[in-house]
Amino acid sequence: MTVSYYSKEPNYLYFYLDYLFMSKSEQIPIIRHIPIAELNKQIKNMERDTKILNRLYFIKFRYEGESVEQAANRVNMTKMVGYIWQERWNEESYEGLVPKYAGGRPSKLSDEQKERLIEKLKSRNNWTTDEVQDLIHREFGVDYTLKQVRVILKHFGMRFAKPFLHDYRKPEDAKELLKKN
C-alpha cells in the first residue's frame, strides 16, 4: 500500500500518531499570568527582539491549548527547551523569558587601566593592532591576542581604516603651497 495524501484508503499511521499525541494530557499546566490580548500586544511590540518573540509565541501557543512539544516544534525548539521556557514563565512571568547572559570572563585590564589606555591611544592618530598589543604589554603587563586587541578597540569605539603611506618628503604646509599655485 502506498501512502499518498490523495488516497481514499484510511492511513492508519496518521491515526496512530494522532492517538499518541492527542491522548496524552499535559502534566505541567501553563499559568496565565496575563490575558491573551495582553500577550498578543507584547508580541506585537517585540517584533525586533526575536529571542523574546519566539518565547512569547511559544507561550501563546500554550495558551491556545497546544502541548509543550507541539508549541516547541512551531517555534523550532526542542521539547526540553519548551519545558524550560514554560517553567520560567510559570515562576517569573514575562521576566522569565528574557535571556539571562552570564557575562563571561572578567577583563584582564581594570577600568582604570582601560581609561589610561584610551588616553594613550588618543595621543596619536594612527595605530596598528600590533602597536596597541605591544603598548598594552609594555604599560600594563597583560598579553592579549591580536583578535582580542581588535575587540577591545571596537569596544572603545575606534574604527579600522586602511593604512596608507605617508610621504616623508611632503612639507607640513603642502595644502597652502598647492593653493598658491
Image (cartoon, rainbow, N blue to C red):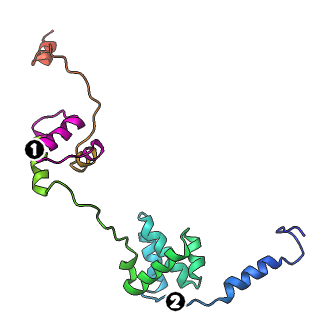
Drawn side of residue 5 relative to residue 59, left or right:
right
Front-most of residues 110 and 43: 110
Against 53, residue 139 (above or below) is: above
Task: Tell me if mark 1 has few (under 14), some (14-19) or many (20+) residues whose alpha carbon lies within 10 angstroms of its own.
Answer: few
Q: Please identify, in this view, whether the residue under mark 2 or under mark 1 is nearer the observer.
A: 1
Assign a secondary structure to mark 1: helix
Residue of label 2? 28
Q: Position of residue 67 (x, y in %)?
A: 59, 83
Q: Position of residue 98 (x, y in %)?
A: 37, 73
Looking at the rendering, which quadrant does residue 15 occupy? bottom right
Against 136, residue 2 (above or below) is: below
Residue 135 magenta-highlighted:
yes
Front-most of residues 142 and 98: 142
Res 155 visible: yes
Q: Position of residue 110 (x, y in %)?
A: 14, 56
Which residues are the magenta region? 121-149
Drawn side of residue 98 relative to residue 81, left or right:
left
Res 47 visible: no
Drawn side of residue 171 relative to residue 149, left or right:
left
At label 1, which amino acid type do we have?
A: Glu
Q: Quadrant of the C terminus?
A: top left
Q: Quadrant of the N terminus?
A: bottom right
Residue of label 1? 139
Q: How many marks?
A: 2
Magenta stretch, main secondary structure, is helix
Badges 2 and 1: C-beta atoms under 8 Å apart?
Answer: no
Q: What separation in Å lies between label 2 and label 1 (alpha carbons)?
A: 58 Å
Residue 98 magenta-highlighted:
no
Tell which circle, 2 or 1, labels the residue nearer the N-terminal end.
Answer: 2
At label 2, which amino acid type do we have?
A: Ile
Q: Residue at x 42, y 63 (%)?
A: 48
Assign a secondary structure to mark 2: loop
